[in-house]
Amino acid sequence: MAKKTLTFISMILKQKQERQIQAVLLIRDLDTHGQEKRRFKSLQDSRINHKSIDSDLQVVIGAAKSKREAWVLNGFIPQTTEEEKKLSEIKKKLKFDPCLEAHRLRGDKKYPEQRDRDAKVVLAQLTEEKFEREQQCWTQTELELLRDRGQATGLTDYLHEIETSLLPMIAQSP
């Protein structure tokens, strides 16, 4: 999929005289059990192969272990008494804090016995499925806290890629 995306972008760039696309963010869940390393390597290989074709295009990789919802949970901070209560109940049921250890949420909601350990389910319970509340988890949470909590979910690596690849490019833009 990553290879196809980069090939498509290259075709668009060749058709335009003025280069408008300067970077691509390849973001993917690595939630296929036992396939995480293969999926991540596929993203890296696509970036390396594309770099030999188009060295000007920045390719940033974001690999969520295991689901992107884990990244959102890394940034969840209860804002109300009700949210504190929900988080406390979830922590009691799981026997760990899903915001500090979101990488441990490896369940699959398709299977009733795993439902409580699914990152999507836990996030939905905490945010009441409100996208605005999810957004607050990454827009209002301190960057240092996201880096700290996101080490095992791939969020820290993604933020590092943004800081080292994308931000310098943006800073150089007129």
Image (cartoon, rainbow, N blue to C red):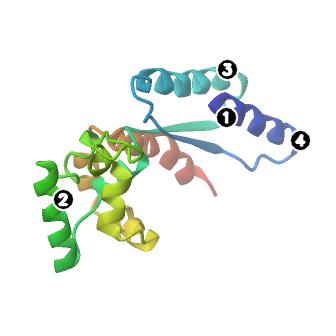
Q: Indicate the quadrant containing the N terminus: top left, top right, bottom left or bottom right.
A: top right
Q: Indicate the quadrant containing the C terminus: top left, top right, bottom left or bottom right.
A: bottom right
Q: Is residue 133 visible?
A: yes
Badge 2 is on which residue? Answer: 90
Residue at image x 31%, y 65%?
Answer: 125
Query: Along the horizontal axis of the image, is 59 left or right of 76?
Result: right
- Secondary structure at badge 1 equals loop
CA–CA distance between discs 1 and 4? 16 Å
Badge 1 is on which residue? Answer: 56
**Quarter assignment of residue 48:** top right
**Amino acid tagged 1:** Asp
Query: Along the horizontal axis of the image, is 118 left or right of 164?
Result: left
Q: Residues within 10 Å of mark 2 (few under 14, many from 20)?
A: some
- Secondary structure at badge 3 equals helix
- Secondary structure at badge 4 equals helix
Image depth: mark 1 or mark 4 in front: 4
CA–CA distance between discs 3 and 2? 47 Å
CA–CA distance between discs 4 and 3? 19 Å
Q: State the residue in front, 156 or 78.
A: 78
Number of labels in the image equals: 4
Q: Are marks 1 and 4 in contact (CB under 8 Å)?
A: no
**Amino acid tagged 3:** Ser
Q: Residues within 10 Å of mark 1 (few under 14, many from 20)?
A: few
**Amino acid tagged 2:** Ile
Badge 3 is on which residue? Answer: 52
Badge 4 is on which residue? Answer: 15
